[in-house]
Structures are given as structure tokens and as C-alpha cells.
Amino acid sequence: MALFLLYESASGYALFEAHGLDEIGQNTEAVRSSVSDLNRFGKVVKLRSFNPFTSALDALKQCNAVSEGILTDELRTVLETNLPKVKEGKKAKFSLGVSDPKIGSQISEVTKIPCQSNDFVNELLRGVRLHFNKFVGDLKPGDLEKAQLGLGHSYSRAKVKFNVNRVDNMVIQAIFLLDTLDKDINSFSMRVREWYSWHFPELVKIVNDNYLYAKVAKYIEDKAKLSEDNIPALTDIVGDEDKAKEIVEAAKASMGQDLSPVDLINVHQFAQRVMDLSEYRRKLYDYLVSKMNDIAPNLASLIGEVVGARLISHAGSLTNLAKCPSSTLQILGAEKALFRALKTRGNTPKYGLIFHSSFIGRASARNKGRMARYLANKCSIASRIDCFSERGTTAFGEKLREQVEERLDFYDKGVAPRKNIDVMKSALESVVNKDTETDTQEVPVEASAKKDKKKKKQKAANVDEADEMAVVDKAPETTNGDAVEDHKSEKKKKKEKRKLEQEMELDQAVGDSAAGDQDGTAKKKKKKTKDKRDDDDGEVPEAVTETKKKKKKSKSKDAE
């Protein structure tokens, strides 16, 4: 059976034909040893066709399609043109060797060409890749390397394209920095306490918070200068007037030693550094909250921004977290305890990073494991929604949080929770309602006002045209200076628009019948009936029209 090889190079598609494989051997080891020798390998593998790409953009398109296992029209044309045709109902007498089984299955499914991908084919393709510039003689030295470099850059650039608002790497770096800052601020605050306690040891017991201690130490500096006048400023810092008075009283009877001005300056500067770090830590936390609301809004609303960020950081990315089953997510962060339990055959851990969630702390001791399993299940659902949904919404996270609250009530009070399908339906309905509300709000008010004005103008124009038509048709019918439309008001004209249209049609019918009649008495009767109709607000009785029709018929009979 003949064997053909498909090689996707950076410059185009190449088809090779392998014949006389006995010269290099039929097994993988024999081919591997003979690949490096071009004289032996060139006798076995021959170039059948080479179809270069038209442009760098076309090369990138073909590379993306092949990597995703999609058969493009260009590749299909190359294969159908250069390979023997497979007759229907008969087995092919050749096979096509490809490097990727995905593209091979796609080719065999669409073109019915049998494909194979194994170690033997991969070794042959390795030899083709090694000696490709020798097989294709038109390539200049360095052309293939330039094409590979350019396509590699384009392919990598296309692969790493992302939405800048949904970069989970920023969350990973932010949570790492937040943990580092917490440790540094804690150690620096302890250093400030220890340093300033040589001068004012009583302040440690009065002010417990690290940030406030650094702020107070920076303000006081020398305790000997502290007096009753400083109480309002200390109250603003501490937030409690009693504490401020206590600080002033303690400074008067302090047992600390005096510090030189240089030492006080250094303490002052270090306390300022600790305050700056604390301020930066607060801003970083706000940044983390905003990024989590952009990247994983449902996970953040379910379990909190910090715990959600820790889960994403530990998994490596939001996509990796979405791939994790709930059982893995439950013990994420407790790998050491898990493997130690498996080694010693002890009890495996019930929770990892999700232990920091408030739900686990609120559950009773015997329900903590069950609560952790349920919470991990909901976190897994929320992470998948955040990862694969196109629009960011917190509707699902809020509903999942309600479910966890209901489960807590069920464990504590026995209240039956809602079914998951009902909760998801309500979440979907809320998302659809929000979308419809945003769509209606996006319609500008000015455009709607302009449309209303245009509609009003069109209506007024239509009414005016109808009135003018009615007056024109009435002009020959009015006699003795009696105008029909003079005594009608504008309001009545608009209301009787439809009546006027019907009247016009009846007038035309009456005018046609009167045109053939030359009797003077008939004209007088016609004028009288018209005057009577004008006086009656333009209403033509049906009896008059019927009598006129009968007279017309009788006159036509007399003429005959």
C-alpha cells in the first residue's frame, strides 16, 4: 500500500510520497537511525507537490485551522488534486500520513481518504522537516527560517489575544501582593511599636490598631511636648475623646526614656512609611475587588472577592478553576494534608481555601464537611459561568448564594430549600429582564421626540390635504353664494374627515348621472337636493340616490 505524507510547513502545504521503505526499514527504530542520512532518506521519500501560501495572513489562517483540526478548502483542494481518487464502494490502495490525529480524522471524514498517525509516520515527518529545504529547491537560504519566525510570532500573538478587562493574571498578582503586604505591614508595625516603646511604652496598651499606632506616634513625636491643647487633634486621629485624654495623661507620667531629635526623626519617617504601605494596601484591595467583579462576578458575589481570588490564584487561572470538579475545588489548598492522609491512611481533609468563607464558619461542627461540599459545588458552577459566559452578570452568583443560605437554614432549622432547576430558571429570567431594560434605555430620548414631531406633522398635512380636496370638489356644487365649508369649525373638519371622503365618492356618482341628463327640471331638482344636503352638514340620504337611479333607468327605456 502506497504511503503519502502531508507536511504543513510555514511557507505552504507539501505532499511527499514514501516508496521503497525496505531500504530504511519498516520499524520505527530503523527509520529513526536513517533519517539523518539524506542520501538514504532521499531515495525513499520524494516530493510530490508543494503549494505555497499566498500571504502571511493566509499562512496564519491555515495554521490556526490545522491546529484546531479543521479542514480548509485550500488543503482539501491540494489533497484532491495530488492524491489518487478513491472510488465509491472500494477500499483505497493508499493512505495519508499526518502528524495530528484530529486533522487526520477530519480529512478521512470529509474526503474519504484513509489517514494514519503513529510513531512510524512521525519519524518520517521528522526527516521531512529536517531536510525540507533540500526537497524544495526554489527556497533560498534563510527563507524558511524567516517564514517560521514570522508565522510563529503571528500565531502566538493571535493566541494570546484577550479582553483586557478579563485578565485573570492581574488578579493572581494582586492577591499575591496583598498577602505580601499584609506580612510586611504587620512586621513593620511591630518594629514601630518596639522602637517607639522605648520613648512612650504606655501607648501600646492604649492604641491596639497598627495603623492608628503609627499615626499617633508620628503626631506625638516627643511626649514631653504633649499637652491638653493636643486633645482635639488626637481625638480626630483616634476617634475617641476619652482615649485622647488617656494618651495625654499617660504621657505626663510615662516611664520611657528620652530620645534625641535624630532618633525621633527616624521614628517619624518609619511610621510614615508604614502608613503609606497601609494606604497602598487599601487601594490594592479596592483594585482587587473591581477586577474580581470584572473577571469572576458570580464567584465574587458567592464566596467573596478575596477567597475567590485565592482560588483562582491557586488553580493557576480561571479556566483551570472552571475545569476542576467540585471535589478538587473543595480541598484546593490542602494538598499536603490530603497526601499525608493518603500516606498514613488517615482521614482526608474536608476543606481547603474555602474554609475562609463565612459559610463554613457559620455551620455547626458536624455540618462543616457537608457545607464545604455543597459550597464547593456552587463555586464550581459559578466559576464555569464566569469563564464561559460572554456577558458579566452577578445574577447567578446571587442566586447561588441564596441557595447556600437556604442550605444553612436546612441544616440548622430543617427548612426545605428550593430546587436547583427553579433557582436557575429565576436567575435566567432576571438576566433576560435586565437585558431588555438596558435595550430600552439605550434608545435616545431625542430621537423619539423627533419621531413624534414628524408623525404629528404628517397627520396635520394629511388632514389639510383631505380638507383641500373636499373644498375643490364642492366648489362647482355651491350655488347662490352658499359655501358649505364656511360654517364648519376646524375641530369639526378633523372629526368628519371620513364622512367627507364618503361624501366625495357619492358626489362623483351623482355628477356622472347628471351629466347625461339635459332636462332643466332635473338640474333644478339636483340643485335643491344639493342645497338640502349642504344644509344637513353634507349628508346625502340613500333614498335620493335610489330615486335618481330609478329615473335614469326609466329615461333610458323611453329613449329606446
Image (tube, rainbow, N blue to C red):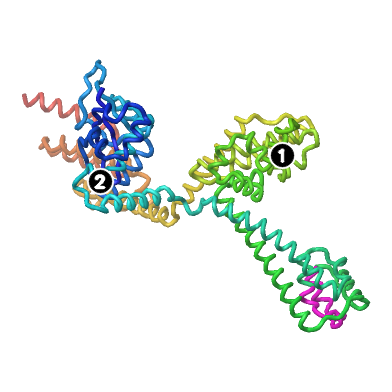
- Residue closer to the observer: 44 or 89: 44
Dot 1 falls on a residue whose secondary structure is helix
| The C terminus lies in quadrant | top left
Q: Is residue 249 above or below residue 350?
A: below
* Residue type pointed to by label 1: Ala
* Residue type pointed to by label 2: Asn
Q: State left or right for residue 556 relative to residue 321.
A: left
Q: Dot 1, crowdedness within 10 Å: few (<14), some or many (≥20)?
A: some
The verdict on residue 219 being magenta is: yes
Q: Dot 2, crowdedness within 10 Å: few (<14), some or many (≥20)?
A: some
How far across and how far down the image is residue 434, in percent?
53, 44
How far across and how far down the image is residue 451, in percent?
38, 52
Q: Which mark is residue 133?
A: 2
How far across and how far down the image is residue 31, in percent?
33, 32
- Tell me the CA gap for discs 1 and 2: 55 Å
How far across and how far down the image is residue 348, in percent?
72, 33
- Residue closer to the observer: 48 or 409: 48
- In which image quadrant can residue 121 be found? top left
